[in-house]
Image: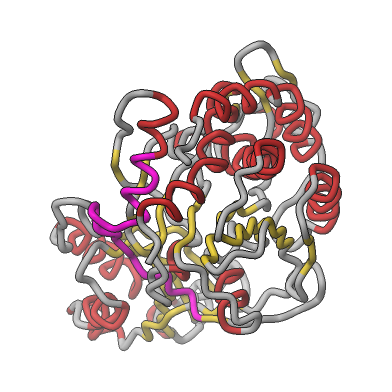
Amino acid sequence: MSLDFEKIVEKAEFYRPQISAFLRDMIAIPSESCDEEKVIQRIKREMETVGFDKVEIDPMGNVLGYIGSGKHLIAMDAHIDTVGIGNRDNWEHDPYTGYEDDEVIYGRGGSDQEGGMASLVYAGKIIKDLGLEKDYTLLVTGTVQEEDCDGLCWQYIIEESKIRPEFVVSTEPTSLGVYRGQRGRMEILVEVDGISAHGSAPERGDNAIFKMAPILTELQELHLRLQDDPFLGKGSLTVSEIFSTSPSRCAVADGCSISIDRRLTYGETWEGALDEIRMLPAVQKAGAKVSMYDYKRPSYTGLVYPTECYFPCWVLEEEHAACKTLVDSYQGLFKCAPLVDKWTFSTNGVSIMGRYNIPCIGFGPGHEDQAHAPNEVTWKDELVKAAAMYAAIPSIYVDKYAV
């Protein structure tokens, strides 16, 4: 029996008020990385209310909601942690109380990316209402700590919970485009040692800040000649932090270190990215140490799941069944072709596909340029359309592409 796309669109539109109300509830709960417990509990209640077959919270604190019990496991992921609000003066309205009008919902997390979760939960309701269960199991994940360490939640889900879907839909914001890849990234530490001396006689010491200065210049030049890719674009680097140590403000600095945000395009490796920096003449002259940061921050449950701060790039082929499933679903629902593109920023796909080669594809409400910005908004029309998409995708996959 063919899918009734019109009924799915009508049902998604019917739930517009509930989707909006649920998203506003989530926005109202501050949920920065490692402090997501209250919003996770709110999501769990909504999943149970709309009729998910099973809802559980894993030891890391991720909420996992299941619909159906068929043999084809399909996952759809929304990270539900947010960044902070930054300078409150840059917000025209309260970032948590926010507001809504006929078109938008305002507040921290609307686009990045609790809007995706609101649409996902009501996609589950649409599936239940219209009897769209087939030979699939839909797993909806509300994942934690993505803003702190993207992909860590899925490292845990795959390694510890032994969950391996046939493919995963990431609901990060895509402006309702179908996104099939992203650059990777890594967090690099460069450290230079010096020798302190009294500031009145700096020649007696070895100033670590001065030793770092030519390294900064060479890093700026290195950025310009990094590898390029016709789809993902160019690799990049920027110095994001600088630190120094000194016995006092009246002394020569005896230590200096910098953090580098390195974006990796297709074909680049973490080993190569470190070696490029290690080979810089100023790095060698200063005897600088170049390494990757580690992440060891406990989740809100207290679980520590350490990992290195390396987040691989990934690209899904345009002819892959997961990509074709989303394109077909979009065309069936909305009678036009979607934009097929890529993200500028990083997502949980760095683990799902980057580390574990589980096919990952993106489709989400909200816009990338709203992420981490003051006065963040998301669009109600997109929330509704995303709910319809998420409800249709499993059936399209099982009917046309599942083996």
| Image quadrant in which you'd find residue 321 | bottom left
Residue at 32 percent across and 64 percent down: it is 314
Q: Is residue 402 magenta?
A: no
Residue 35 appears in the picture as rendered: yes
Q: The C terminus lies in which quarter of the figure?
A: bottom left
Q: Position of residue 220 (x, y in %)?
A: 24, 58
Q: Is residue 310 magenta?
A: yes
Does 247 sit left or right of 27 as displayed?
left
Q: Which residues are magenta?
A: 308-328
| Image quadrant in which you'd find residue 329 | top left
Q: Furthest residue to the top?
A: 102
Q: Position of residue 259 (x, y in %)?
A: 45, 67
Residue 236 appears in the picture as rendered: no
- Which is nearer the eye, 62 or 8? 8
| Image quadrant in which you'd find residue 69 | bottom right
- Which is nearer the eye, 12 or 93? 12
Residue at 22 percent across and 59 percent down: it is 223
Does 62 sit left or right of 324 as displayed?
right
- Which is nearer the eye, 317 or 243? 317
Q: Is residue 25 above or below residue 198?
A: above
Q: Position of residue 200 (x, y in %)?
A: 50, 72
